[in-house]
Image (cartoon, rainbow, N blue to C red):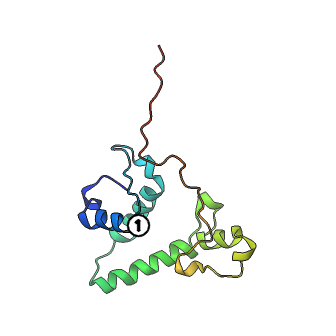
Amino acid sequence: SDNGTELISMAILRWSQLTRIEWHYIAPGKPQQNAFVESFDGQLRDELLNETLFLSLDHARELLAEWQEDYNTVRPHSGIGNQPPCTYAMLTASVMQQDGTLRCVEGSAPHPVASPSRTGSNDQRILPIDG
């Protein structure tokens, strides 16, 4: 996650400990380590959050659900061959998953598009000094 104060809270850290999920922070000043989320957050902010005056929490949930539906099932994404994520997930699913076991409308994908990092984001890197 980002090192910003909006994401550092006792509730998040407590949840992380209770669920035994490791919490990793990106290096300060290195947003490219979290490029997918930075891009997504920017799109959500520019296309919905900055443009909308939410009248209630229910109104916000409704508009966010509509935006999510469009983002996942209608809008083409250049990183996956200009297809919506739902279509890409179905086309790349294993034969056992193509029967619709995992539904795209619920936000589930058969498998991650990118493989997880083998080293983690908090590893210390030592660069050799030429000299």
Residue 96, quarter of the rendered image: bottom right
The answer to whether residue 91 is left or right of residue 26 is: right
Q: Residue furthest top?
A: 131
Give me the residue at 26% from left, 83% from top.
55
- Residue in the foreground of this view, choosing between 53 and 56: 56
Which secondary structure lies at badge 1?
helix
- Residue in the foreground of this view, choosing between 103 and 63: 103
Q: Answer above or below: position of 114 versus 84.
A: above
User: Residue 82 location in percent, x, y?
Assistant: 63, 63
Give me the residue at 64% from left, 70% from top.
89
Few, some or many C-alpha atoms within 10 Å of disc 1 (few <14, some 14-19, many ≥20)? some
Say which amino acid is labelled 1: Leu
The answer to whether residue 121 is left or right of residue 114 is: left
The answer to whether residue 42 is left or right of residue 110 is: left
User: Residue 114 location in percent, x, y?
Assistant: 58, 57
Give me the residue at 32% from left, 75% from top.
52
The answer to whether residue 129 is left or right of residue 18 is: right
User: Residue 105 location in percent, x, y?
Assistant: 56, 81
The residue that disc 1 covers is 44
